Amino acid sequence: MSELESIVSAVCSWLETLGIRAAAAYIPGAARRHREPIVTVGLKTGAAMTCGQADYLGIKTDETGASRELYAKRADLTLELDIWAPRTAESSAQTCADIFGTLAARIPALPGGIRVREISCGETRFDETAGMYFCPAAMSATVFLYAQAEEDGMFTDFYVKGVLKS
């Protein structure tokens, strides 16, 4: 999983814990007609920075006494959190506003490795192609990722700090 995929996955998982259906924006059909509200998460802008010398932070010793090298990355990102709601008796443009209100109020519940600087939204409109109400929203954040080297010195994935690996 790439660093971006792990960030998008962490935000989608957080949305799901709030009871909000979520999907990565780059998945084909993520914004197609749905029967319930959904938030699509994708990258709008981003910049990555190194942490330490060549991302190296030091050595971490676990409870068994085994030592592993620890690496980290930092990314300043703006994520698109596009809110979609079907036009039904139970769902409307107000549903988009309600979902954004929940997002804004629950920012402190994000994983510790995602530090939000700003959350904003645009005007809600009806999207004829999708047949749903659409509210473009964005979240600017600094994201911290980490990786531990395996015994052979290689590592495969970076993980968002504060998110458990499954």
Image: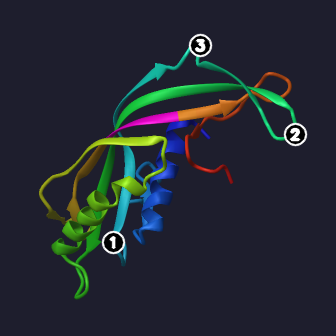
141 drawn magenta: yes
Residue 37 image label: 1
Crowd around label 1: few <14 · some 14–19 · many ≥20 (10 Å):
many
- Whole-percent x, y for residue 156 in the image: 70, 32
Counting the numbered discs, the total is 3
- Of the residues shown, which amino acid type is indicated by label 3? Ala
Residue interval drawn in magenta: 140-144
Furthest residue toward top: 53
Question: Is residue 22 inside the magenta stretch?
Answer: no
Q: Quadrant of the N terminus?
A: top right
How far across and down, in percent of the image, does residue 17 sit?
47, 66
Mark 3 lies on residue: 54
Q: Is residue 28 visible?
A: no
Query: Percent position (x, y) of residue 73?
Result: 53, 26
Q: Which residue is mark 2?
A: 64
Q: Residue at x 36, y 76 (%)?
A: 36
State the predominant SS element of the stretch in magenta.
strand
Kind of element beneath mark 2:
loop
Picture residue at 68% right of the left edge, 26% below the top: 70
SS at circle 3: loop
Residues under numbered marks 1 and 3 in contact, where contact means CB atoms less than 8 Å apart: no
Residue 105 location, quadrant: bottom left
Camera-nearest label, 1 or 3? 3
Disc 1/disc 3 C-alpha distance (Å): 42 Å
Quarter occupied by the C terminus? bottom right
